[in-house]
Image (cartoon, rainbow, N blue to C red):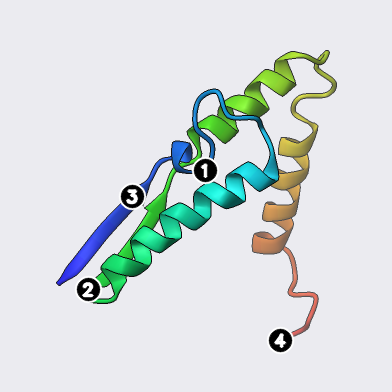
Amino acid sequence: MRVVIALGGNALLRRGEPIDAAVQRANVKVAAEAIAAVARDHQVVLTHGNGPQVGLLALQNAAYEPVAPYHGSCGLGLTSTVEVDGPDPLGP
């Protein structure tokens, strides 16, 4: 049987836990052991979220004055356009 397992970001970092790589690794280990048990008898499709991590980044960003917020977006747009519309740098 094919089983879909969706891990939320809280599987990595639970509310109230310190924001620490060791804590996240320990939580991942617990999740991986549970997934491995299911995978012994089933095909597993694994997906994940990252809500707490994105929330942490949002809090970090809010703590600083914005500096050129669209600078990266412009670079990405230019790079994408050059790659799509420009000549192939490797030739034909």
Please state if 52 lies on the left or on the right of 40 as rendered: right
The residue that mark 3 highlights is 6
Mark closest to the chain's N terminus, 3 or 2:
3
Mark closest to the chain's N terminus, 4 or 2:
2
What separation in Å lies between label 1 and label 3 (alpha carbons)?
A: 12 Å
Mark closest to the chain's N terminus, 4 or 1:
1
The residue that mark 4 highlights is 92
What separation in Å lies between label 3 and label 2 (alpha carbons)?
A: 15 Å
Mark closest to the chain's N terminus, 1 or 3:
3
For residue 86, what is the image quadrant? bottom right
Q: Which amino acid does label 3 sit on?
A: Ala
- Which residue is depicted at the point 67% across and 47% down? 22
User: What SS does tag 3 mark?
Assistant: strand
- Which residue is depicted at the point 63% across and 26% down? 56
* Residue 8 placement (x, y as % from top left): 41, 41
**Looking at the rendered structure, which numbered label has been put on residue 12?**
1
What separation in Å lies between label 4 and label 1 (alpha carbons)?
A: 46 Å
- Which residue is depicted at the point 44% across and 60% down? 32
For residue 66, what is the image quadrant? top right
Please state if 4 lies on the left or on the right of 46 as rendered: left
User: What SS does tag 4 mark?
Assistant: loop
Indicate which label's residue lies in the foreground, 4 or 3: 3
* Residue 76 placement (x, y as % from top left): 72, 46
Can residue 44 be seen in the rendering of this structure? Answer: no
The residue that mark 2 highlights is 42
User: What SS does tag 1 mark?
Assistant: loop
For residue 1, what is the image quadrant? bottom left
What separation in Å lies between label 2 and label 1 (alpha carbons)?
A: 23 Å
Picture quarter with the C terminus = bottom right
Q: Which amino acid does label 1 sit on?
A: Leu
